Amino acid sequence: MIDTHCHIDDPQYTEGLDAFLVEQRQDGVEAILVPGVDKTSVKDVLEVCNLYPDYLFPALGLHPENVKEDWREQLATIKAAVDERMSNSPKGVQYPIGSTPSAQSLFGNTLFTKIISYTCGACDARMSGAMVQVMSNSGSGNQGISCSIPVYLYAKENQCSEEQTLRALALSNLTVIYIKQSLGRLSALCGCVVAATGSAAGITYLMGGNYEEITYAIKNMIANISGMICDGAKPGCALKVTSGVATAIFSAYLAMQHSYADSTEGIVEDDIDRTIRNLTRIGHDGMKVTDDLILDIMTHKQ
């Protein structure tokens, strides 16, 4: 519970302020907004809020009853105080202990979060039994979701042409199929690694990337999340899809800056086909024992 209007800067609260705030906390009030009414109240409001910076929060402004001929001057003074406070705050926006910020305040309302939300939501709905059709790839609905939705949303938000969108979707899906043909149908390597790699290629293309830059994006993906395991189809797969798609967007962006993992790093080689073969070799040959171990753990949980 948050008290959104308490003139705690009033002199009547000066004595016994600590005890008053303790009572408020005990009654379940997690934070208090202290409103200002005009420029003359700015000093008192900020002073009392500075005494309890994690519990009292200033809400500076001009009350309608205080709107006079000098209202422009009043607002300018108030705005200057707000700007100064924001610039001098080392922590930025604070949240009371025990509270949780909203997703939008934490992550922002961007294309990045939209792509993750839509893709993760689609995977979660499918894994939870929603009776809806999905686009599959290599026999997997989750892989189809992960290599199609991010590319489509990026194209839509950036007003790409129908031809550009179709080319990007084709590139993404064909990249996944190309990787899967040497990986095999079943592997302890999570399919979202492969599917998100397709998305990275498609998004890089939509960003204006050429063949070389698309290979950079694929190398970034393989250098990053190639060790993600598959431990069965379940709603929790949405978390792995989220990780894969987020990495795909980062990989595409970095590729366009010509920032990528090269042959000095791990399983990445200069040749993109050999790099892909290294990934699929790990997934097909190297994870056979991993697959047995995962199954053993899953069937002997207590």
Image (cartoon, rainbow, N blue to C red):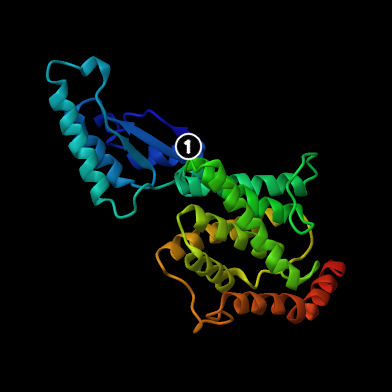
Label 1: how many residues lie within 10 Å, few (<14), some (14-19) or many (20+)? some
Which residue is drawn at the image coordinates 71% and 63% (left, top)?
177
Q: Could one spot residue 126 in this view of the protein? A: yes
> In this picture, is 14 found above or below 149?
above
Outermost residue, bottom side: 264
Residue 219: quadrant of the picture? bottom right
Where is residue 243 shown, x and y percent of the image?
59, 59
**In this rendering, position of residue 176 left or right of residue 33:** right
Q: Residue furthest front?
A: 163
Note whether residue 236 is visible. no
Work out whether 236 lies above or below 290: above
Badge 1 is on which residue?
A: 29
Measured as percent of width and height from the top left, residue 176 is found at 67, 62
Looking at the image, which is closer to me, 22 or 174? 174
The type of residue carrying mark 1 is Val
Quick one: 217 or 292, which is closer to the camera?
217
Q: Is residue 72 left or right of residue 286?
A: left
Residue 47 in the image: x percent, y percent? 23, 41
The residue depicted at 12 percent of the width and 16 percent of the height is 69
